[in-house]
Each structure stands twice: as structure tokens, then as C-alpha cells.
Image: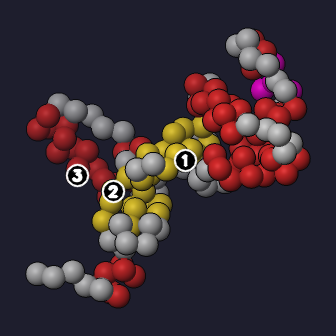
Amino acid sequence: MDSLADLLHARGSRVTPQRQLVIQQVLATRGHIVPEAIYAKVSQQFPSINRSTVYRTLQLLEEMGLIQHAHVEEGSTRYHRADDPAHLHLVCHDCNAVQEVEDLSVGEPFRQALLERFGFDCDLTHLAIAGRCQACRQRAPSGP
């Protein structure tokens, strides 16, 4: 935490107790980092903390390369620690469940097709694929 504080100071950023607690919560989180969950935890200790402090701190950590923004679903901001394994997100339209797929090779044919057809080399670690999960499909199969 001290070296991270030094990095923040070097960037001209203040290291307030609130920001330190946000950073501690981020570093302790595995999987999806949800700003509202971080806010809820930090506000227990600092009830007057502003949500913008959490979002600005997360943005700063992203700029520093410590976390990555995950484009999971519309209107939902989530992050991952940069040292978490890369993965795809499968987002269910019906139940909003998010399944993580760490085997990026499943997306390789898609990545290769985009590269060959459009010359676009995509980053699958930021890919969310929307559809219906197996459980929702079994409950209410779609028509023909």
C-alpha cells in the first residue's frame, strides 16, 4: 500500500483516508469489482464519502493499469484486477447472470475471423456476449 501511495503522490493525486480504504477494498476483491459494492463497504467507515470519490479512484487505478474496466452489460460498471486471469463474459438477458469463461480459445475463431475479414484484432478480455443461459433456456425454450 505504501508503494501505491507513492505512485499516487508521484501522479499528483492526494491519498486521503477514504481513497486509501477504496484502494484496500479493491485490492481485497477477487472477481468483479463493482463500484457500488466498494462504496457500500467504504461508507460503513466513512458515511460522508461521495460516490464520485469511489469512481474517480477506480478511474485512477485503471489509468495506472492496476484494474481493467469490464464491459459486461449496459449500464453496469465493473472492473477486474489486472492480475486476474483474462476471461470472456456470458451475460443472460433473462436472469442477468454473468458467467466467466477463462478458456479464451473458445473465442479464437471469432477473433481470427474479424482479423481476416476486417483487419481488426480484437481484445477478447473485454468481450461480453449477451444471450440466454442454459438454465433460462431450459425453463422457457425459445420458439423455432
Left or right position of 132 against 71: left
Judging by the rendered image, the residue that carries numbered circle 2 is: 129
Query: In percent of the image, x 68 and y 39: which residue is there?
Result: 51
Residue 63 visible somewhere in the drawing: yes
Amino acid found under the numbered disc labelled 3: Pro
Judging by the rendered image, the residue that carries numbered circle 1 is: 78
Where disc 2 sits, the SS reads strand
Spot occupied by residue 28 in the image (x, y as percentages of width and height): 76, 49
Spot occupied by residue 45 in the image (x, y as percentages of width and height): 88, 47
| Residue sticking out furthest to the bottom | 139
Given residues 121 and 52, the one toward you in this image is 52
Q: Residues within 10 Å of mark 3 (few under 14, many from 20)?
A: few
**Quadrant of the rendered structure where residue 115 is?**
top left
Given residues 104 and 142, the one toward you in this image is 142
Spot occupied by residue 97 in the image (x, y as percentages of width and height): 47, 68
Query: In percent of the image, x 61 and y 55: which residue is there?
Result: 31
Amino acid found under the numbered disc labelled 2: Ile
Left or right position of 62 against 119: right
The segment highlighted magenta reads: 2-6
Judging by the rendered image, the residue that carries numbered circle 3 is: 109
Amino acid found under the numbered disc labelled 1: Arg
First in sequence, mark 3 or 2: give its number. 3
As measured in the structure, the alpha-carbon distance from the residue carrying label 2 to the one carrying label 1 is: 15 Å
